[in-house]
Amino acid sequence: MVEATRWRENAQPRTMAWPIPQKRHVMAADDLSAPLRLFLDVLESGSFSTVARQQALTPSAIARRIDALERSLGCQLFNRSTHAVRPTSAALAFAERARRIVQELQLARAEVAARDGAPQGLIRIDAPTPFGRRHLAPVLADFLAAYPNVDVQLRLIDSFVDLHGEHLGEVDLVLRIGPLADTRLVATPLAPMVRIACASPAYLERHGTPLRPSELAGHDGLDWDVLAPPYAWRFSESGKPVLCRPARLRMRANNAEALLSGVLAGLGIAHLPTWLISDHLLRGELTPLFCDDGLPTPEPSGIYALRLTREADSRCRLLLEFLKARFGPQPPWDMALRNGLQRQ
């Protein structure tokens, strides 16, 4: 069960003889930021259909909401064709402010949650080791410094079984990267997922640089052992989705950091997430492949926080808003990489 932002339809006016007390509604940050988040998702993916799949809506519903945003702004944000949705210059200028507004609203919501009953106590979290070590632990340290009455127990694990949420009940939140297998769990999206084919400069100097995904068959590679991510080695070539992978796998592993070590050592080409390799790409230790037009489109699945109950307690609600503000709508690792690719 994935949390989705719902748009409120215009209510029809009614005339009543006597005033009836109404339940007071407090508008949340998600209500305020929904049109902007939708705009940023379409800008990032370049596709109404991709965003529609992510939000369990139809492409026409996404198009109508973008139409409404364009009317409210008084300008066109996207040029649309049967094959692509391309941002206008106005959209690109608006995007940076929209990102800041969404992040500020999420932080404001976290502050409101913090004042609501002064959350305190322990939050127990399971997370995948590579992501937890690189990105989650530093953010948790900032969170704990900001909220001294809250404590965190973080368990970093490599087991794919655990990351499906099997230990929910023993912990409060499980961070999950990839498709959601159990629809009984409530999932809060934290960040999109982008994957890039990459290799070390030394490997490419010895074996040459593939110019298109179909040339991967002539190269060595590194890949997941048994439980491969469903969108690994999937690309777009000549406007069509293709599945292309190296013919010879020099290394297989069930751990992302092990694959990263092999790629850095020059063993071959791997298809790895940007949250894992962004720093290495920026430092020139790895070379991105097939990125002439910028970062690839985000995968339909992303990075989520799972829980058992729909209504999170005040501690978890506070942390979820903090994580959303730090990781989205455009993750810092993708923003840095996008800026780096533009300068190259």
Image: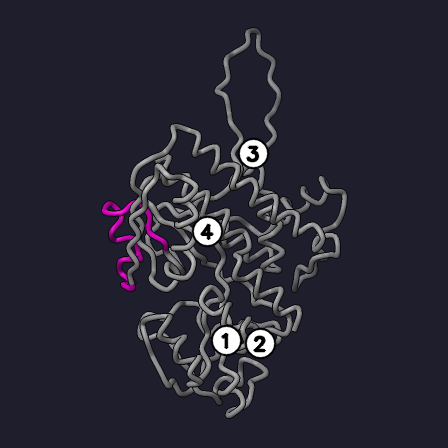
Horizontal side of residue 157 vs 261, given as left or right: left
CA separation in Å, label 1 and label 4:
23 Å
Q: List the residue tagged with mark 3.
A: 8
Q: List the residue tagged with mark 4.
A: 190
Q: Which residues are magenta?
A: 158-175
CA separation in Å, label 1 and label 3:
41 Å
Which mark, residue 290?
2
CA separation in Å, label 2 and label 3:
41 Å
CA separation in Å, label 4 and label 3:
23 Å
Mark found first going from the N terminus, 2 or 3? 3
> What is the crowding at mark 2: few (fewer than 14 residues within 10 Å), some, or many (at least 20)?
some
State which mark lies toward you, 4 or 3.
4
> What is the crowding at mark 4: few (fewer than 14 residues within 10 Å), some, or many (at least 20)?
many
Horizontal side of residue 174 vs 273, given as left or right: left
Q: List the residue tagged with mark 1.
A: 197
Mark found first going from the N terminus, 2 or 1? 1
- Amino acid type at circle 1 is Ala
Q: Secondary structure at mark 3?
A: loop
Q: Is residue 95 magenta?
A: no
Q: Residue furthest bottom?
A: 206
- Amino acid type at circle 3 is Arg
Labelled pair 2, 1 in contact (Cβ < 8 Å): yes
